[in-house]
Image (cartoon, grey):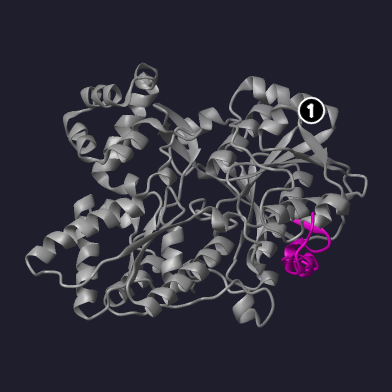
Amino acid sequence: MKKSLLQKERAAYQPKLPKGLRGAVKVQEGEATQSVGDQEEIKKLFPNTYGMPLVEFVPGEVENTQKLNVGVILSGGQAPGGHNVICGIFDAVKKLNPENKLYGFLMGPGGLVDHNYIELTADIIDEYRNTGGFDMIGSGRTKLEKVEQFEKGLEVIRELDIKAIVIIGGDDSNTNACVLAEYYAAKNYGVQVIGAPKTIDGDLKNSQIETSFGFDTATKTYSEVIGNIERDANSARKYWHFIKLMGRSASHIALECALQTQPNICLISEEIEQKDMTLNEIVEQIATAVANRAAAGNNFGVVLIPEGLIEFIPSIGRLIDELNDLMAAHGDDYKDLDKDAQRAYILAHLSKKNAETFATLPEGVARQLSLDRDPHGNVQVSLIETEKLISDMVEAKLADWKKVGKFTGSFAPLHHFFGYEGRCAMPSNFDADYCYTLGVSAVELIANGKTGYMAIVKNLSASTDEWKAGGVPITMMMNMERRNGEMKPVIRKALVELDGKPFKKFAEKRDLWAKETCYVYPGPIQYWGPASVCDRTTRTLALELEK
């Protein structure tokens, strides 16, 4: 792999570890845990991995020299810092015993099932330190949920004498990790399974996980480009930029980027759902801001739109729920029909209210909602051009207002979707340190006999020295939810809290931002310089952990 000058410099960066993980380490166990919801059902499904205690690592006296081999899997979408988790695992495994080996399963969980792997040596690892992407071993979205998959994976685990598997992924991937851990524990196979919290969306968060890795880097990457667009808008003074941001199930990315860049408008899906707003009400709100700015001579602006907005508009959310059940039960009956017949079939099988909503949607949007699903059975909201849909509706509204003299300016919209641009960015100092610490924590959990745990790091708004590394039982984060027409155990997603400090800070300022031009241009991620710039956490984390 040919390296840029920046990569060569970054390769030399040594991630910082908290005090509890330097030198000898011992485990400090906390109270027994229970799931966040549906305790009886979760306990029945996970009798061998339920109710385990929280774990924190503190300085110990005796160095562990355990002999063990470990397998690692990258699962789901990419997030900056994934390579550093693997580097942390590698260094910690070799520190225990230089003869220990780390195996990478290729292209996600499917690599375990298909016995597709490589041994990760120092030469390979050193090529990827502090780099973005998941290209060291690749990633995939195969779901680990069937007994034959578990047994097939066990064959290669036995062949390579692997003691534990580390699955680096988001909420669905870590749910799969928990299912795998429970199966191997129930069979007394002696194979441990550990998770690591990855997702740029920021929705894998709770009382024990302060932030998922990759969120820091991705939001800084997006905010740099949003700032550039804001500056361009303020220079040309003739365009309205509609920017859709990744984050299908929560608006954390949009909110964080708004706090960093101060756009004129930022929609927060969770607020729209709570207020039971319609699509027309959202459009009216944006059109009013456009008209007000035009009246002041400002025919330009920036609007941030979360990727999953469509699902949070209550009437459309209810429609999607019914479409999911219809797809699960009768998808085969209509998926091969021509588009007119499909539409007629769906309208005939929906409840009256949902049929009315479906009939009002543009044909392309209706088709995407009714047919396309990802491997987890979710609507592929990234394919829906929400930013274009909304700007078209705003344009139509302004045209009506122009006829009656309510709007006298001009409106020229431009569209952007920032998603893949942020998923493989070179990790910030924060994510480089955080991910490396997660990797070392995963190995300490393995060395201390834990399974069904997720590696965690807390106190993240303090200096790295004061971070607290440990583990949380994955069952603690689970509840029962409807997926593909069935109730299944899953990790509960964390949505934007409307009574939380980050949203309140945003809500305090947004009326001013809508009227005035208050743009902030954060610039690129900083790797060198004063800690106040280089090691700054996200605004979300700083506000949430504010004492």
Residue 307 locus on image (x, y percent): 41, 51
Circle 1: residue type: Val
Q: Nearer the viewer, residue 52 or 73?
A: 73
The stretch of residues the image draws in magenta is 1-26
* Residue lying farthest to the right in this orientation: 99
Is residue 367 visible in the rendered structure shown here? yes
Residue 95 as seen in the image, left or right of residue 436: right
**371 up-or-down from 408: above or below:** above
Q: Nearer the viewer, residue 88 or 135?
A: 135
Badge 1 marks a residue whose secondary structure is helix
**494 up-or-down from 340: above or below:** below
Residue that badge 1 annotates: 156
Residue 536 locus on image (x, y percent): 58, 74
Residue 360 locus on image (x, y percent): 20, 40
* Residue lying farthest to the left in this orientation: 404
Residue 293 locus on image (x, y percent): 24, 75
Residue at 70 percent across and 48 percent down: it is 135
Is residue 209 visible in the rendered structure shown here? no
User: Does 23 lie within the magenta span?
Assistant: yes
Q: Residues within 10 Å of mark 1 (few under 14, many from 20)?
A: some
Residue at 38 percent across and 74 percent down: it is 233
The quadrant where residue 530 appears = bottom right
* Residue lying farthest to the bottom in this orientation: 530
The mark total stands at 1
